[in-house]
Amino acid sequence: MLASLTFNLRQRISDWIFRARFPEQPPVVLIQRRIFILPSRTGYFFAFVLVLLLIASINYSLSLGYLLTFLLAGMGGIAMFHTFRNLLRLSISPGKVEPVFAGETAHFSIVLANPNLPRYAIGIKRAQIRNAEPEFGDASEQTSTTFQIPMMALKRGYLKCGRLEIFTEYPVGLFHAWSYVDFGVPCLVYPKPDPGAGALPLDMRAKGEGNVPVRGDEEFQSLRAYRAGDTPRQIAWKALARGQGLLVKEFGSTASADLWLDYDALQGLPVEQRLGRLTWWVMEAERSQMPYGLKLPDRNIRPDLGTEHRDECLHALALFGLES
């Protein structure tokens, strides 16, 4: 109960202090007014013991008791200074965030640049999740350290990590020093590919210039390695007799080069299922090196191939119906 109240109080204070600062422009340098520090649970217990020692020393007039009490208090003050210095002057910047498919784990990269003095036991976690699992690491002098903050991508669109807490309790765990950053960097989440889409919809081809090879049984195309499930009539027995191993003949035909993946052709299916099937076909067409275009109610993407074309199509599918 006390931990929950403390967490909610810290969240309200941070919301009030940083209400006009997010999203921030990188890099963010942790200067004195950005770092907060309070005793940890161990620190509160340590303070309670010091109070007991002081009361006992006063009650019994123990000179050595005073010496021990103030010696421990001085060590606690030094520990507080080192804990605070472990964060001071750290420079924080966002790293590159790779797109993922819905259902996968997105990784938000945070880069800590350390201008001086080695830093130890630096932790980063999502600030608005009470039991978020932190990522820990050390930062050597005049080097940069990259932290990966994982986050499950449950649905397509833009996924934001939210506010991050950078904290430390080094060196002895008596104090908890922390600061907040929020760069507002999103991760693009593509629709989850739907394997139920099956093979590419060759009936969606339009008349166009040029032909490309597709699977069929009209003419021999190439040999490939045997896979479980291939029929004996596909095996290249002559190649086996020549000692080339177990190979299988592949046959094919040619078709129009303009394959259009059309959203409206999937009528009767829910929106997310349509997008999942189109995503599957985009990946299949790219893997098969078959030029393809994408037709959505709000835009058309001309047939093409390549990583940039694939990313453009997946980007359009990810944000379909979400952008104004």
Image (spheres, rainbow, N blue to C red):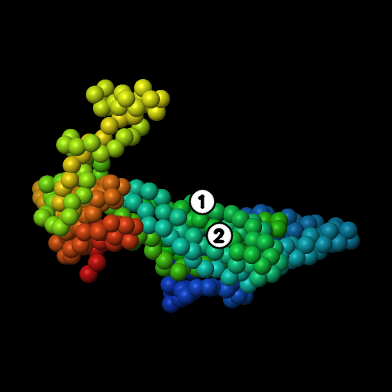
> Relative to residue 271, is residue 119 drawn left or right?
right
Disc 1 residue type (three-letter): Glu
Quadrant of the rendering where the C terminus is positioned: bottom left
Which residue is disc 1 drawn over?
133
Q: At 67% from the left edge and 58% from the top edge, which residue is drawn?
A: 120
Mark 2 and mark 1: span between their CA atoms?
17 Å
Q: At 25% from the left edge and 44% from the top edge, which residue is drawn?
A: 194
Q: At 65% from the left edge and 70% from the top edge, which residue is drawn?
A: 115
Q: Residues within 10 Å of mark 2 (few under 14, many from 20)?
A: some
Location of residue 179 (image quadrant): bottom right
Q: Residue furthest right?
A: 63
Disc 2 residue type (three-letter): Thr
Q: Is residue 90 visible?
A: yes
Which residue is disc 2 drawn over?
146
Tell me where residue 279 appears, x and y as whole percent: 25, 51
Frontmost residue, 37 versus 295:
295
Query: Is 64 above or below relative to 13?
Result: above
Location of residue 314 (image quadrant): bottom left
Q: Secondary structure at mark 2?
A: strand
